[in-house]
Image: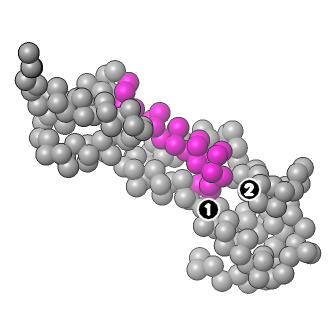
Amino acid sequence: MTSVEGPFEAAKKKSLRLLLFRPRSTAELREKLREKGISHETIDRVVRWLEERKYLDDRAFAESVARTLAVNRLWGNFRIRLHLREKGVSPGLVEEALRAVRLELGEGEAIARYLEKKYGKTGESRIDLKVFTLGERRRLFQSLARRGFPRELIMQTIRMPKEEKIHDGQ
């Protein structure tokens, strides 16, 4: 005996499968359902159903992703902000998530952890640049900038003299 599903049930099942694979923002889920040819009205119904049951929650999604990127990947706010915006999270929720995660791990501490991980320094928040060539310092600066950390914080943390010009495109 086979059952015939309506568009709502089919879209709901598809949504739950997508959310089981990995958490998604509302915008991401809507886009995936649109790609499958599901009507706008059905998508709205499914999204409401998922939100009512807390399967879809942009605030929780933003906080979880921001925490993962800040603590595990050691990204700076700029890159986290960009990533969440690409996922369709509203600017207000992005900023809330960043504030929450930075109470746990500030950007300066994230840089220090990154340096410990990269260079094996323990217990030091700053590396000794006396042993680094100018080229090595530039590469370190650029690496931290690509991770989304602000220029001034990078220079302060790695004790890079401001008069030493780094051409990083900023």
Question: Which scheme is used to colour this image of the protein?
Answer: one colour
Q: Is residue 60 left or right of residue 151?
A: left
Disc number placed over residue 147 in the picture, else none: 1
Tell me residue 107's x, y (percent): 69, 53
Tell me residue 104's x, y (percent): 69, 39
Is 50 placed above or below 149 here? above
Is 18 placed above or below 129 here? above
- Please provide the residue range marked out in magenta: 54-77
Task: Inspect the image, locate mark 2, and give the three-letter code of the amino acid beneath it.
Answer: Tyr
Q: Quadrant of residue 1?
A: top left
Q: Is residue 107 left or right of residue 130?
A: left
Give the camera-side residue of 110 and 116. Answer: 116
Q: Residue at x 17, y 26 (%)?
A: 9
Q: CA distance from mark 2 to mark 1?
A: 10 Å
Residue 60 within the magenta-colored segment of the rendering = yes
Residue contact between numbered discs 2 and 1, judged by CB atoms under 8 Å: yes
Task: Inspect the image, locate mark 1, and give the three-letter code of the amino acid beneath it.
Answer: Arg
Q: Residue at x 31, y 45 (%)?
A: 27
N-terminal-most mark, 2 or 1: 2
Q: Residues within 10 Å of mark 1 (few under 14, many from 20)?
A: many
Tell me residue 32's x, y (percent): 26, 46
The prevailing secondary structure element of the residues shown in magenta is: helix
Residue that protrudes farthest toward the top in the picture:
1
Q: Is residue 104 left or right of residue 127?
A: left
Identify residue for label 2.
114
